[in-house]
Amino acid sequence: MKTTSYWWEAAPRIETNCNSIPTLADVVIIGAGFTGLCAALSLARNGVSVVVFEAGVLGCGASTLNGGMVGPSFHKLGIEGLQAKYGEGRANDILRESVGFVDYLEDFIKTENIDADFIRNGRFRGALKPSHYDAMAKDLESLKKATGVDAEMIPKSEQHLESGSPRFHGGVVYQKDGGLHPAKYHDGLVKKVLDAGVVIISQTAVTKLKKMATGYEVTTSSGTLNASQVAVCTNGYTEKVTQEFRRRVLPMRSAMIATEALSPELIKELMPKQRVYSDTRRVVTYYRPSPDGTRILFGSRASGLKDKPQSNADLLKSFMTAVYPQLTGVSATHVWSGLVAYTFDHAPHIGQFGGKDGLFYAMGYCGSGVARSSYFGTKLGLKMLGNASSETAFDDLIFETAPLYNGNPWFMPTILAWHRLLDRFGL
Ligand SMILES: Cc1cc2nc3c(=O)[nH]c(=O)nc-3n(C[C@H](O)[C@H](O)[C@H](O)COP(=O)(O)OP(=O)(O)OC[C@H]3O[C@@H](n4cnc5c(N)ncnc54)[C@H](O)[C@@H]3O)c2cc1C
């Protein structure tokens, strides 16, 4: 079993050379995932000189490790919680804008002509208990009212048309969700960013940021430069060098497996419409066919913060056969994992830290960042330009931390274990 991403088979990571570091740039971006690259593109195409630093090889972060499933992620925001916290008007604006993330991504990929196997084949989310189905139906009613989202409830009697899993008590189909090949998308983005004149320096970590009279002195593992503005686009990989952000995000490890090639008949039985899939577990599981329709890619939260391939593969196989008993005995050819970033209010965050000083950020996608990070990255670039079209309904959400939390989520494995126990009893 390989311990690298299945996506890297069709789009291998390339050991890029370390460009020499310029001494000056208008903007430094930390992190070359979707957020950093999209921000770089919108800045560079508006005449700004940009240097992107990436600590590892290009695409070593979550952006080429994810399930490639795209959607607005309503259930993470929680419509009632949002309305209680921000009021109905603001919450509805946030939800409506979220519906547009996938439209934005589709449009972007088409306009830029990026070959990323993008498809809008819909998402089926299965209800693990009848009570989950009822709660979903209630939620969907409010969502439709607030956003007009194109989705429908699928009762248990019709579920076989959507899923070959015997586990569910009906579910919901979000018609406009979909999937892409994340590593091909990342490679396409890198090309566009380089064509726009951005300097990308990989295998070079930013190690210190010093506020100067104007802008920042940026120290890296290979040299120093000065920039007027800095964008922190490090999401689940946020480190002590930007401690003000590290203490606002909760890194969690998410892992995936790819099965061996399956017969077309079996894939058709398990995933009749070849959509993307998830369910109502607290510790989310997500799954989809590979873009060529030959395998199942299955993911969930990993057992801890460290990468433990064998125990992740064992855990995921047990989750997978619980959903699809038909896959008992099927082996995995790949297992891999990466870090996502949760936030204390379950919402992603974007802005300028403290509203001044030129330190910008976009992060905290709570495990659903393929469409969100592309959208937020682009908006972030526009914000740094001072462009009015950078406005979003997510502006000014308070980016909370918690007392005594310093960025080390030592308590998360216990919380995860508790949630898994609740899942086991369907609570
Ligand atoms: C296994 C897995 C499955 C997922 N599945 C889905 C899915 O199906 N759908 C979905 O919407 N989302 C999914 N996600 C989440 C999604 O991948 C992320 O939200 C998104 O890719 C975040 O992009 P980003 O650019 O903000 O961060 P990343 O892509 O993580 O990039 C951050 C980069 O910052 C770099 N960095 C950190 N510190 C420094 C420093 N000091 N100097 C230089 N560079 C630095 C890191 O090396 C890293 O490459 C999944 C994530 C994982 C791990």
Image (tube, helix red, strand yellow):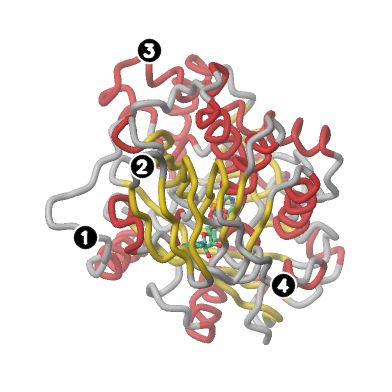
Label 2, residues with CA under 10 Å away: few <14, some 14-19, many ≥20: some
Residue at numbered disc 2? 346
Residue at numbered disc 1? 406
Q: Earlier in the sequence, mark 3 or mark 4?
A: 4
Q: Which amino acid does label 4 sit on?
A: Asn
**Location of residue 300 in the rendering, given as x and y in whole percent from the top left corner:** 50, 63
9 in relation to 276, above or below? below
Q: Element type at marker 1?
A: loop
Residue 259 visible in the picture: yes
Cβ–Cβ under 8 Å for marks 3 and 2: no
Q: Residue at x 59, y 74 (%)?
A: 336
Q: Distance between the residues labelled 1 and 4?
A: 34 Å
**Location of residue 289 in the rendering, given as x and y in whole percent from the top left corner:** 74, 59
Q: Element type at marker 3?
A: helix
Q: In which quarter of the image is residue 294?
A: bottom right
Task: For marks 3 and 4, give the one nearer the viewer.
Answer: 4
Residue at numbered disc 3? 89
Q: Which amino acid does label 1 sit on?
A: Asn
**Location of residue 82 in the rendering, given as x and y in whole percent from the top left corner:** 33, 28
Which of these two is toward me, 352 or 278?
Answer: 352
Label 3, residues with CA under 10 Å away: few <14, some 14-19, many ≥20: few
Q: Residue at x 38, y 51 (%)?
A: 342
Task: For marks 2 and 1, give the one nearer the viewer.
Answer: 1
Q: Distance between the residues labelled 1 and 3?
A: 33 Å
Q: What residue type is labelled 3?
A: Gly
